[in-house]
Image (spheres, grey):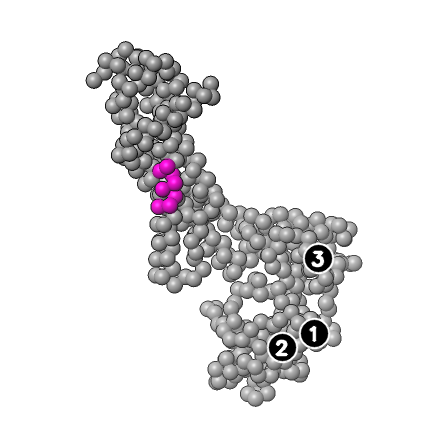
Amino acid sequence: MITAVLAAVSVGVGALRDNPLRTILSTLGVIVGVGALVSVLSLGDAMESFVRGELARTTDVQAVTVQVRSRILVDGEWVPVRDVPIFTPTHLEQLQRELPMVRGAAMFLNGSARVAWLRSGKQRQVGITATTPGIDAFGKTALAVGRPFTVAEATHNAPVILLSYRLAAELAAGRPAESLLDEWVRVRGLPRQVIGIFAAFTGEFGYSARVPYSAAGAVFGPNFSRNAPQLMLQARTVEDLPGMQHGIEDWLASRYRNWDDKVEIKAMEQQLEQVTQGFGVMKLFLGTLAGISLLVGGIGIMNIMLANVTERTREIGIRKALGARAHDINVQFLTEAVTIACFGCALGVALGATITAGAVMGIRAWSKVENLHFVISPSTLLVAVGSSAVIGLVFGTYPARRASRLSPIDAIRHE
């Protein structure tokens, strides 16, 4: 049985090798179809990668916030919550170690203080965030000048501060906002060096600043409580977010009784569902468009194979007269169809990847978007290879069955 199948396969491959022009014509439709499929899907991969990067960089869709509840609603009245957990940077480190899907994590406290620059005599009441260095992973606002504070500066409570652009411009009093870089301002009367100024953005209002988490006591004053910090964790991908949220819940449940009455976990679930659905619809739409091209290539295979059957009718008759069974003829022609499809798939993948790489380079040059890169996912390659094999089998079946059913006598007499 196996020997007969291998012999049929050998005959089929030999027939393709002996007729290179016919093989090339048969393969051309598959090359174009697979090339279109791979180029469209890989362009989709590149756009998806770009969108995911922008979502992670500019939004909180992949983030979960953990916050202690100060009060809860009981029978229509707000009641203070007792014995709440007190989170520390050590807890944040534990979460990062225990949850491999976490890409970034930060702990922060919000408060306010008066910030003044003695050289201009200006001062403003400012909303200040005391945070760990990990907040940079959630950076929605880039720095115009300067740098973020380092881990060492955060650990040793270095007297550093980052200012919003609007605050720096107000304190500068007519000078450029960037002129405050490396200058010393006073926060609650204590000096702090400006090591960075955030870039201005449309809709900026109010005044804000950022200091190391260890500086909260000095910046916010002795009456400020450290009992209500917020933890923010960012998942590596959109798909990792539900698993990360469940991991946080398990971590809390293992340490605190009735934690859900004392801790609130916030995630942008509705926005996440919309983003995930959008990715799926985009890939389905692009795949459908490319599948039409591949279908055309499959029809081309069937037409060429039917022409092959007609052209090689006498050959088929001779093989049957020499003892070949209908099954052997069927395997031979199916082998030819699948081989054509697979060979076309290899060339089509190369063609599609080349088209995509060129398109991505052109889009980057035209739009000046540096975060757009050529991407071709394993799923795209799998779809291309699988669909090519299916196309070869489906569109090669009818010609193969037609060839296998020919009568030996009628086939030998065929001119």
Q: CA distance from mark 2 to mark 3?
A: 27 Å
**What residue is at 51 percent from the left and 61 percent from the top?**
58
Tell me if residue 7 comes above or below residue 67 in the rendering: above
- The quarter holding residue 21 reads top left
Specify start and end residues of the magenta stretch as a single range.
343-351
Which residue is most to the left? 415
The image position of residue 263, as x and y in percent, is 70, 55
- The quarter holding residue 405 reads top left
Reading the image, the residue beneath label 1 is 156
Q: Secondary structure at mark 3?
A: helix
Asked whether the residues under the numbered discs 1 and 3 touch, taking CB atoms below 8 Å apart as contact, a structural biologist would say no
Please state which of residues 58 and 221 is positioned toward the viewer in this rendering.
Answer: 58
Q: Residues within 10 Å of mark 1 (few under 14, many from 20)?
A: few
Reading the image, the residue beneath label 3 is 94
Q: Secondary structure at mark 1?
A: loop
Q: CA distance from mark 1 to mark 2?
A: 11 Å
Closer to the chain start, of discs 1 and 3, is 3
Q: Residues within 10 Å of mark 3 (few under 14, many from 20)?
A: few
The image position of residue 266, as x and y in percent, is 62, 54
Tell me if residue 264 comes above or below residue 109 in the rendering: above
* Quadrant location of the C terminus in the rendered image: top left
Please state which of residues 64 and 400 is positioned toward the viewer in this rendering.
Answer: 400
Closer to the chain start, of discs 2 and 3, is 3
Secondary structure that dominates the magenta span:
helix
Marker disc for residue 160: 2
| In-image side of 209 versus 291 (left or right) | right
